[in-house]
Amino acid sequence: MDASSGSTTDLTRARRYYAGLGLGERVRASLDAATTGEDLAIEALAPIDQNHVGGAEQTRRLARASGLVPGSHVLDLGSALGGPTRHLTREFGWRVVGLDLSFAFCSVAQFLGTRLEPGPLPGFVCGSALQLPFPDGAFDGVWTQHAAMNMSPKDALFSELARVLRSGGRLLLHEVLRGSRQPIRLPVPWASTEDLNQLSGEEDLRTTWASTGLRVVEWNDTSGDALEWFRSQAGAPGSEIGNGVDLVFGESGPEKRHNVVRNLLERRIRVVEAVVEKESS
């Protein structure tokens, strides 16, 4: 997840929150305990590197709705441990680069690629979503799953995403939004305190997109699907390699995951997916 504390330059609090101290060691130990050192199929990493509601299947669902073709150049914004970045590269044939604010996340994302069966791998860049190190019109698509929830101001964020999209390019978003009841229950994976919680409401998001030359092509509220996915996860045996949220956040991981479900049930948050297109110039 990428993040901002509310300024385009002061990212100290957000970077500290996602510092992932000892994360590399925990991930290596988890893999070593569950595997025998052999190359892994990409699905084997999904429990730890697809850290979003719906897991790998949600990544596939949004990719199928994207309208993008093999060879498309795509930025994965807030790439975290790199699960979607690698899936989009290998399963859909896109040319993907992942960007995240956290040095630890970028390092672990690179490491996990070395544990996979041979195949194409994306690159990862550590940087800010509010000051992207890419030229205008560089990408056919910008992909983001559960990342804008930490970023503010939203007009600066989406102006920057529109800048790096080519004319007619697409923003592919799977995101948690503010629900009808507030405040949300904390802590959650994206925030332990209210200052890090930057959830948008739907109307605010649509207004911001319109002001930055982005128009909605497809919009789906997937909150019901999200709850069904959590129910299925609760009844499934645990992964031998662990859970990504727990590896990232340690002892607070289970409480944060539990609060996501409570917030969904109490309509304090929503989960949506959207395909948004940059207006042709």
Image (cartoon, rainbow, N blue to C red):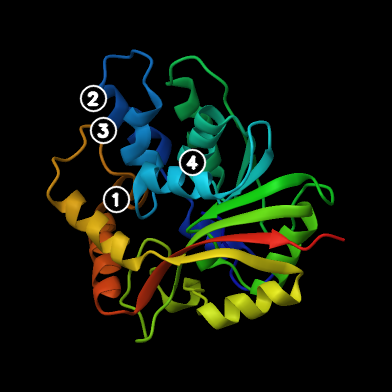
198 or 274, nearer to the observer: 274
Name the amino acid, label 2.
Ala
In the rendered image, which residue does mark 3 sit on? 241
Which residue appears at 41% of the width and 74% of the height? 193
**Mark 2 touching mark 3, by CB under 8 A?**
yes
- Viewer-nearest of labels 2 and 4? 4
C-alpha gap between disc 2 and disc 3:
8 Å
Q: Earlier in the sequence, mark 2 or mark 3?
A: 2
Location of residue 275 with respect to 76 vertically, above or below: below
| Distance of label 1 from label 4 (alpha carbons) | 22 Å
Q: Amino acid at mark 3?
A: Ile
Q: Give me the disc on residue 161.
A: none
**Marks 3/4: CA–CA distance:** 18 Å
Front: mark 1 or 3:
3
- Mark 1, secondary structure of its residue: helix
Q: Residues within 10 Å of mark 3 (few under 14, many from 20)?
A: many
Up-down: is 214 above or below 43? below
Q: Give the residue number, with chain letter if any, for mark 2.
A: 33
Q: Which residue is rendered at x = 51% and y = 44% of the image?
A: 64
Q: Earlier in the sequence, mark 2 or mark 4?
A: 2
Helix, strand or loop under label 4: helix
SS of the residue at dot 2? helix
Name the residue beneath numbered marker 4: 84
Image quarter for residue 223?
bottom left
Q: Quadrant of residue 83?
A: top left
Query: What is the distance, in whole Å, between disc 2 and disc 4 at their CAs?
Result: 24 Å
Which is more toward the observer, 169 or 159?
A: 169
Question: Which residue corresponds to the image point at 35% horizontal and 37% vertical from the top-left?
Answer: 46
Q: Which residue is mark 1?
A: 250
Quarter of the image where the C terminus is located: bottom right
Q: Amino acid at mark 4?
A: Pro
